[in-house]
Amino acid sequence: MHSRTVGALAALALALPMASQAADFGYSLVDLTLLPHAEIEVGNGDVDGDGFQLRGSLEVSQTFFALVELQSLDLDAGVDATRWLIGAGGHWPLNNTMDIVARGGIVRLEIDAGRFDDDDTGLFVGGRLRATVAPKIEVEGGIEYSSAEVFESGNDFYLVAEGRYHFNQQFSAGALVNFSGDTQQLGVYGRFNF
């Protein structure tokens, strides 16, 4: 799966220069993601399940924004996983259709597995490209690193990819995929931009 995703990201990067509409990205938003597929490697095995993610960010200047994320997963064998992110980011235009985005902050991971639980707090940092590739269609992809680790899972680099369709200035819908050596997530979301 890693080679297919890397190939898709490479194809996406080649397609970005073909965009012709001026970008008007907003960084004040809230969205809710349903995650029908989530997988986490815990110890020597992995557990599957589903969950949700709630994200928000607020522009605090023309270049910078604050962000917060909550993710909750209900996995097989009675395993529950929760992730919190709080931090800040910045965005800088590369051209009239593309921004480079940097994010960083604090991450908290918690996993409950029956009578066993583990939690850790660490840092996350990452970079992404965000681009308009056609009228009303936007893509975003990049890499993030998280230093938090629970049950020998985490402390890893993540590839992130998203695509979204803008119905109007306020509402959009999209899909996302995130994966690392220890996790895989597929989701669909609705977003409100303000």
Image: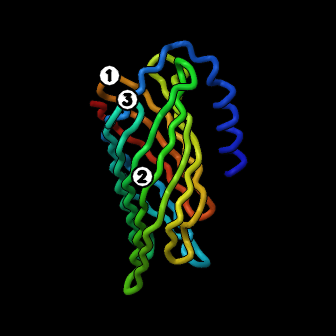
Residue matched to label 1 = 169
Camera-near label (2 vs 3) is 3
Q: Nearer the viewer, residue 124 or 36?
A: 124
Residue at the (44%, 76%) spot, across then down = 77
Q: Quadrant of the C terminus?
A: top left
Q: Is residue 176 left or right of residue 156?
A: left
Q: Residue at x 63, y 17 (%)?
A: 18
Label 1's element? loop
- At horizontal 45% and vertical 63% (from top left) the residue drawn is 49
Separation of disc 2 and disc 1 at Cα?
Answer: 25 Å
Identify residue type, mark 2: Leu
Residue 156 screen position, x and y as percent: 59, 62
Q: Which residue is mark 3?
A: 62
> Separation of disc 1 and disc 3 at Cα?
18 Å
Decide if residue 33 is on the left or right side of residue 103: left
- The answer to whether residue 94 is seen in the rendering is yes
Query: In terms of sequence position, does the residue under pointer 2 or pointer 3 come before the other?
Result: 2
| Sequence-first tag of 2 and 1 | 2
